[in-house]
Each structure stands twice: as structure tokens, then as C-alpha cells.
Amino acid sequence: MITWLMLAAGLVLLVIGADTLVKGAARLASSFGVPSLVIGLTVVAFGTSAPELAVSVKAAYAGQAELAIANVVGSNIFNVLFILGVAALIMPLIISKQLIRQDVPLMVLASIVAMLMALDGQISRLEAAVLFAGLLVYTAFLFYQGKSKPSSETADHEIDDMLKDKKPAWQSALLVIVGLVLLVLGARWLVQSAIELATAWGVNEAIIGLTIVAAGTSLPEVVTSIVATIRGERDIAVGNVVGSNTFNILCVLGLSGLVSPTPLLAGAQMSAIDIPVMVAVAMLCIPFFFAGSVLNRIEGGLFLLCYVAYTWFLIALSLKFEYLPDLQKGIMYGLVPLVGIYVAYSLMQDLRHRSKKHNM
């Protein structure tokens, strides 16, 4: 009971800490003359991944390297399949051209790079440094891109509302410090409780990291994307998830590998199953987003179905359920072909629609 209370308290502190950090950092950046569009692309987008960063860095520094990787992999899978699935069921999501041409390919590329790095069962400090260097280049690119766009293109009303409330720089800095303290404390409690749960249930830490911890640290993305969808800012809901996933790989994995006393270990299951699933989920976004530039309710339902199947498989695998072989066959020969057929159908319909439009 105490472990569950510590887990819940850790999650609450992470969410409050992330929100406090984002508000303080956004206002502090604004006081130095940074445009609100740039703040949205960098500070706010990256701030929603602060819980993943805090938990993975704490786990890596404490020697739970597999938990650090599992948190990132699980969060990225959860972000796409669960968050976008729920958001699309609420209201079909609009996919901007920038997401299709730039942001999604970058997310896929980062995912593939991480998978290749983990093929030998670990991510070395040098490989982590490469990921973190990629983050610096990516952030500089976003900053340049945001500065070159007119301010009228800023569509995130939440950021504009946040920046309307002018505060002295010292108060904004204090919010940043308080947010960081809450994140550190929440991460400590969450990691400790996750380890205790894994021990009590007789499963490895990676399973807890891929499920409970991953879903918990993604709560800011859940809130941000669903609220944006309800408000009608449906492109922001998708952009938040894609940007967060790229940040998770480049920054969270990169920084975790740099602070870890040993290379980040990816177990046999992580290298053979979970990381390839993360890559497959990222690649699945390309045809789904390309077809009609909309993620509709049927596709949102398929995303949720895939997440339920993946989570069910993880639980069955870790607890060695007798029906595991049948579940594997159901996923491989049922769900995967179903998704493949739907993707092919959607692309054919989209090409047919574009062809008719071109001939008119």
C-alpha cells in the first residue's frame, strides 16, 4: 500500500513539477525577448517530456539502466498509440504538412538510430553523446525555423495566455527552480516504488518501466494533447506527441547515457521486441498521417487496439501465461495483417482522391 502511495505521489509531483517548470521557463524566455512561437516549439514541447527526463536520468544514475531505456521506449509507444488514439476518437486529428514532411521523418530517423545503437544490447556513453548532440542541432534548427516565421503563425492560445501574465524575471526563475525540485523528488519516489513493485511481482524492472512508469510520465502529453483536441487545436495535439517522442530519444536517452556510470543496458527482450515495436509504431505514423492528412476515428481505434494488444502481450510474457503462444499468433496473423490491409486501403483511397482532384 505504501509503495502504491509513493508511486501516486511521485506521479503527482512529476506532473506539477513539469507544469511549474514550463510556466517559469516560458515566462523567463519571454522576458529575454524570445518569440512565443519559438517558446512553443522548444520550451513547452520539451517541457512536457520533463517527467521522462527526470525519471530516466535518476534511474540511470542509480544504476537501473534498463529502467531508464524502458521508460523512453514505453513512453514513445504510449504517446502514439494511446494518446493519439484517444485524441482521434474524441475528434479526427488534422496533420499539418510540416509534420508529414519534417517532424515525423525526424522522429522515425531518431527511433531507427536508437534501435541500431541498441543492437549490441547496450547504448555506450559515446552513442549517448551522439544522441545528445543531435538534440542540440535539432533545437537550434527549431529555434531558427521559429524565428524565421511571422508571429501571426503562432496558433497555440495556451502559450499566448501563459505569456500575457507578465512576471518579474526572478519570479519566473523561482518557478523553474521549484519545478526542478519537484521533478527530482517525484522521480526519486517513482523509481523507488517501481523497483519495489517489480520485486514484489517477480518481474524485471523493464516491464514496470514499459507500462506503469511510461504511462505515468506521459501524463503531461495526455493532458496537453486531449485539451488541444477539445479546443479544436488538433494539429497541436499531434505535434506535441511527435516532438515529445523525438525529444525522449535525443535528450532523455542521450542525457541518461551520459550520467550513467555504466553503458545503458538493453536486455534481450528490449532489443528484440520493445525497441523494434517503438520503431514500427513511429513508422506507422507515416502512412496514417499521409493518407488524407487526417487521423480519423477508425485509425484512432486501431491505435488503441494495438496498444492494448502490446500491453497484454507484455503482461503475458512477463508472467508466463499458458496462452502466450496463442496470443502471439493472434497478434502476428490477425492484428498485424488487419493494420496492413487498412493502411493499403487508406493509401489507395487517398491516391484515388488526389488523382480525381488533379484531373478536375
Image: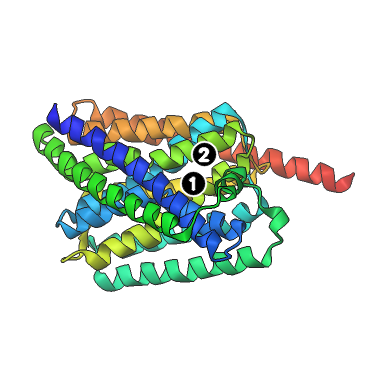
Say which mark, if any, is on residue 225: 2
Query: Split into 4 quadrants, where in the image is the C terminus?
Result: top right
Would residue 230 be seen by someone viewing this image from the given angle?
A: yes
List x then y, in percent, for residue 292. 68, 41
Quickly name the residue at label 1. 241
Amino acid type at image mark 1: Val
Q: Is residue 35 left or right of residue 128?
A: right
List x then y, in percent, for residue 282. 47, 49
Local packing at callout 2 (Cα closer than 10 Å; few below 14, some 14-19, many 20+) is many
Q: Check whether the beta carbons of the residues at disc 2 and disc 1 lie within 8 A of each other.
A: yes
For label 2, the SS is helix
List x then y, in percent, for residue 17. 35, 46
Q: Residue at x 54, y 57 (%)?
A: 39
List x then y, in percent, for residue 147. 63, 66
Q: Residue at x 24, y 30 (%)?
A: 324
Amino acid type at image mark 2: Ser
